[in-house]
Amino acid sequence: MVRLLKAVYEKMLAAAVQGSPEEVCGLLCGDIADKVISDVYLLENAEHSECRFSVNTREHLDAVRDIRKRGMTPVGNFHSHPKGPSEPSEEDKRLAYDRNAVYLILSLENTPVLKAFHIENGIAEEEILVIEEGFSNGAVK
């Protein structure tokens, strides 16, 4: 199960809507052991594409440094599918190199749909995603 702070979902949704028709992407952070996502670092889609993304390497490294300074860990990544379903494409699966990462995909195809995936060896399995109002003492309320 993946737990996501509602404010983070709203931040991702606003960025995806604003960035459409291009895919929007970001780095998720929080507690990887418990799969709790407490923030997202929105990163430039260096491809500026409607159907693919790659992160700006400099921004990515800066985000990882800041995440660690804040006492959190990178948890995974997020990207939008402005015109497609909330399912990993073949390229998404091929590029998913970290089997411990959480992969969130936000579709804007009809109504916004956010899904979480575990991707390993090119196989994507949907995970339960719970969007929470807030955290209390590091735990999800």
Image: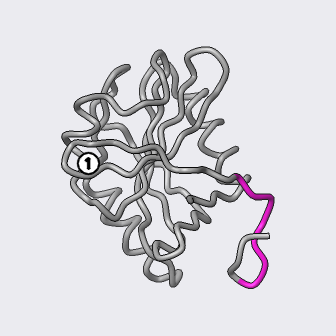
**Residue 127 drawn above or below residue 63:** above
Q: Which residues are magenta?
A: 131-137
The residue positioned 26% from the left and 52% from the top of the image is 120
The residue positioned 31% from the left and 46% from the top of the image is 55
Which residue matches tag 1?
A: 96
**Amino acid type assigned to the residue bearing label 1 in the image:** Ala
Residue 66 at x, y percent in the picture: 45, 73
Q: How is the image coloured?
A: one colour
**Residue 53 drawn above or below residue 140:** above
Q: Secondary structure at mark 1?
A: loop
The residue positioned 44% from the left and 65% from the top of the image is 75
**Residue 42 drawn above or below residue 54:** below
| Residue nearest the observer in this picture, 52 or 18 | 52
Residue 53 at x, y percent in the picture: 31, 34
Asked if residue 5 lies left or right of residue 72, the reply is right
Specify whether residue 34 is painted magenta.
no
The residue positioned 62% from the left and 14% from the top of the image is 110
Mark 1 Cα-neighbour bin, 10 Å: few <14, some 14–19, many ≥20: many
